[in-house]
Image: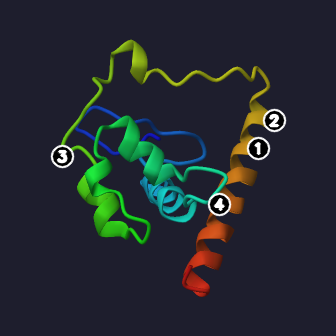
Amino acid sequence: MRILGEGSAGGNITHPSAVRDPIDTVFALLKLLSLRSTKEKLGLFEIWCKQSNQMGLFKENFTLTDVLASLPRYFTTGAYEKEAVMKIKSTDHSVFIYYYDFIHLFLLFIAFFLYLFRF
């Protein structure tokens, strides 16, 4: 799971935003916190700990502090590296904007719901 941030020349500005938006980071952390392990399926934080060889940090009742402790302190992708290019397959700009706006509004609603009911 990518945790996005902003560097001096990194990141991107996706329409309709006029500035870099840290909301991707917030939602990535919410996903790590909310998609927990069950008897049938591993949760995202447990998967992350296994993949990053940090199982010593995993516990069933983990918190935001545990998640943050597992993240690298600093990592960057240069603005002009191949991995930094956002690949968009849509050729219809209006359809892209419609779904982009829809997804962001939906995610904001979920974040508000989680905050309101303290999940």
Question: Which disc is residue 99 wearing?
Answer: 1
Between 47 and 101, which is closer to the camera in this rendering?
Answer: 47
Between 116 and 105, which is closer to the camera in this rendering?
Answer: 116
Q: From the viewer's perspective, is residue 43 above or below residue 108?
A: above
C-beta proximity under 8 Å, tags 1 and 2: yes
Q: From the viewer's perspective, is residue 101 above or below residue 34?
A: above
Q: Which quarter of the rendering shows the C terminus? A: bottom right
Q: What residue type is labelled 3?
A: Arg
Question: Which numbered disc, 2 or 4, marks the residue that appears first in the sequence?
Answer: 2
Question: Which numbered disc, 4 or 1, marks the residue that appears first in the sequence?
Answer: 1
Which residue is label 4 attached to? 107
Q: From the viewer's perspective, is residue 7 above or below residue 17?
A: above
* Coloring applied to the structure: rainbow
Task: Note whether residue 30 is visible.
Answer: yes
Which residue is label 3 attached to? 73
Question: Which numbered disc, 3 or 4, marks the residue that appears first in the sequence?
Answer: 3
State left or right for residue 80 relative to residue 101: left
Count residues near mark 1 (Cα–Cα under 10 Å), then give few for <14, some for 14-19, many for 20+: few
Q: Distance between the residues labelled 4 and 1?
A: 12 Å
Count residues near mark 3 (Cα–Cα under 10 Å), then give few for <14, some for 14-19, many for 20+: few
Which residue is label 2 attached to? 95
Q: What residue type is labelled 4?
A: Leu
